[in-house]
Image (tube, helix red, strand yellow):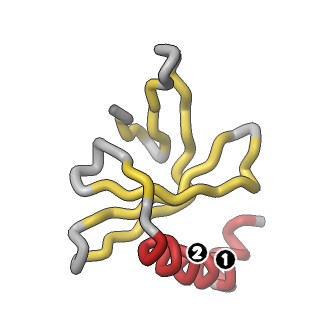
Amino acid sequence: MPTENNGTFTVLADDGTEELINILFSYVNEERGKTYYFLYRSEAPEDVIVMSSVDDENLEPVDDDELEEAEEVFNAYMDDPKIAEARK
């Protein structure tokens, strides 16, 4: 079970080791009752993955419909000039 702490999740891997995953940003889809997290590892910040959660503790993979929506949200995030300025 991942635990959230200051913009990161600590994830327990299958081998029992803990890994720190960074949260780029998240958003809530109230219709689905889920929060979607855009995550990346420090050593590969260009590789962003999206996971969902209904309880903000257990991360789950997204289905194709959710992924399509998440890609639209991510593209809007990346195209926002205020966010682009903040990333500099």
Q: Is residue 77 left or right of residue 7?
A: right
Residue bearing the label numbered 1:
78
The crowding category of the residue bearing disc 1, from other C-alpha atoms within 10 Å (few below 14, some 14 to 19, many at least 20), is: few
Instruction: Return the residue nearer the eye: 78 or 85.
Output: 78
- Residue at left 52%, top 79%? 68
Looking at this rendering, what residue extends furthest in the top direction? 16
Q: Quadrant of the N terminus?
A: top left
Mark 1: amino acid = Met
Q: Secondary structure at mark 2?
A: helix
**Splitting the image into 4 quarters, where does residue 71 fall?**
bottom right
* Secondary structure type for disc 1: helix
Image quarter (top left, top right, bottom left or bottom right) of the C terminus: bottom right
* For the residues bearing labels 1 and 2, Cβ distance under 8 angstroms: yes
Alpha-carbon span between mark 1 and mark 2: 6 Å
**Residue at left 50%, top 25%?**
13
Residue placed under numbered mark 2 in the picture: 74
Left or right: residue 52 compared with residue 42: left
* Pair 1/2: label in front: 2
